[in-house]
Amino acid sequence: MLRYLEHKADVLFEASGASFREALEEAARALFETIADAKKVKATKKIVVKQSAKKLDELLVFTLSDLLTQGDVHELFFARFKVKKFGKKGDVFFVEGTAEGAPMTPRLGRTSVKAVTLHESRVVEKDGKWTARVLLDV
């Protein structure tokens, strides 16, 4: 589930799922939908994203930041992100996933996202539901 929240200058949203993996995938979808009309992106390219962090909120932000950077570097709009591996080794969480996208076109573009911020970002698990809150600097 995805829910956009009111924010004065930037984009704030909450993405949720039955697991952290699902919440992260939904958060990636929200990022992609903010940047472009992701439903109309016909995926022709695939990239791999690997991140690690000591806290889940950092892992969330680092992963989304990597997706934002990869999209800019490779000039891609992404349609979807799928978590392939997620776990914890020692005191470090890790994630590996793939994003599928297509070359950027003005027709599909929406908003230029400058950064995924740690400010106001958090991950919460309550009663088996995981919620990821993210603030995008636009």
Image: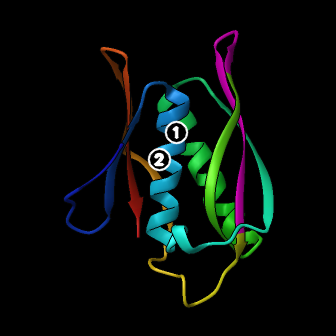
Colour option used: rainbow
Asked whether, in this view, residue 79 is left or right of residue 44, the answer is left
Q: Is residue 91 magenta?
A: yes
Per the picture, the main secondary structure of the magenta-coloured stretch is strand
- Look at the numbered disc 1 and give the secondary structure of its residue: helix
Looking at the rendered structure, the kind of residue marked 2 is Ala
Q: Are marks 2 and 1 in contact (CB under 8 Å)?
A: yes
x and y percentages locating residue 137 in the rendered image: 41, 64
- Look at the numbered disc 2 and give the secondary structure of its residue: helix
Q: Residue furthest bottom?
A: 106
Q: Is residue 92 magenta?
A: yes
Residue tagged 2:
27
Mark 2 surroundings within 10 Å by alpha-carbon count, few (fewer than 14), some (14 through 19), many (20 or more) = many
Mark 1 surroundings within 10 Å by alpha-carbon count, few (fewer than 14), some (14 through 19), many (20 or more) = many
x and y percentages locating residue 82 in the rendered image: 66, 43
Q: Identify which residue is drawn at 63% across, 49% down.
A: 81
Asked whether, in this view, residue 7 is left or right of residue 52, the answer is left
Looking at the rendered structure, the kind of residue marked 1 is Leu
Which residues are drawn in magenta?
A: 87-101
Distance from the alpha carbon under mark 2 to that under mark 1: 5 Å
